Amino acid sequence: MNIPEEIFDIKNWLVNNGIAEKLEAAVILGSGLGDFGNHIEDAKIIPYSDIPGFPQSTVVGHSGSLIIGTVSGKAVMAFSGRFHFYEGYPFSKTVVPVQLAKAFDVNKLIISNAAGGINLDFRVGDLMVIERILHPHVEIDINQTENWPEELKANSKRVIEIATSNNVPVKKGTYLYVTGPNYETKAEIRAFRGLGGDAVGMSTAPELMEAYRIGVKAVAVSLITNAAAGVTDQKLDHEEVKEAAEMKKDEFAKLVIGLIERF
Ligand code: HPA
């Protein structure tokens, strides 16, 4: 499975601090989506800064802690705060949460993110189930398994079924990965639309690739927090990410709980 030895050192530290050896599901919480942590029962909250060897998250709006507890009776770990390439991490470090989940035998990973809507049918606050990944111009140096795009597509169907049966409206589409840190230009967004991108964001693609590489069943959902550049006249800033997340936190939680229970 090929996970770095340091990941097991992190696991051992957590187990020595009272965490069980095996967990059932993991959730990576996107910008502003940390509120999901309040749905975790008997939660143990461990700041990343307390965990020896763990990278530290530097982005405003990511609190940077690992939350371990139960959801619907299942043992879960949630990463509130993740590691982006634009913060200066190599791709090999952006996937530490995925590797740590695997070290705890997790086989159900739910990845979330904030993203800009490229698809003109999308509105701020929509949840988009990720069916496909595009990463034009960016070489992500993670070994990819041959058929992970097909597996992701198949798993995304199941997410849509679960969302629908839980009465959570979702869109579906292609997530176009950019490294950031700058938001895109209008011209880029026009080009990305032509390439088939429905939403644009700066995370998730490396994490999904790594999950499939090491054999963790993974799905991903974007919260559309803004219209991508040029879609409307509004200026882009981090405030609207927080506003959209606040607006949709209950629906997002309902979806993630449904996935923990049934995916
Ligand atoms: N572009 C890139 N990443 C993002 C955006 C965006 O418009 N919104 C939230 N994350």
Image: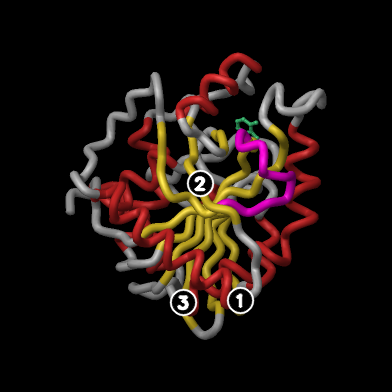
Mark pair 2, 1: CA separation? 20 Å
Image position of 90 (left or right of 120): left
Per the image, label 3 sits on a secondary structure element best described as strand
Can residue 11 be seen?
Answer: no
Magenta-highlighted residues: 118-128
Q: Label 2, on which residue? A: 173
Residue closer to the observer: 58 or 207: 207
Dominant SS in magenta: loop
Residue tagged by mark 1?
166
C-beta proximity under 8 Å, tags 2 and 3: no
Please state the horizontal and vertical placement of residue 177, each as a whole percent of the image. 47, 32
* Real-space CA distance between mark 2 and mark 3, rounded to the nearest whole angstrom: 30 Å
Residue at 33% in and 29% down: 140
Name the kind of residue labelled 3 in the image.
Ala
Asked whether mark 1 lies closer than 8 Å to ligand 1, one says no
- Which of pointers 1 and 3 indicates the residue nearer the eye? 1
**Which callout, 2 or 3, points to the residue nearer the camera?**
2
Q: Is residue 227 left or right of residue 161?
A: right
Tell me if mark 2 has few (under 14), some (14-19) or many (20+) residues whose alpha carbon lies within 10 angstroms of its own.
many
The verdict on residue 226 being magenta is no
Q: How is the image coloured?
A: secondary structure
The local secondary structure at tag 2 comes to strand
Residue 154 in the image: x percent, y percent? 34, 60
The tag on residue 75 is 3
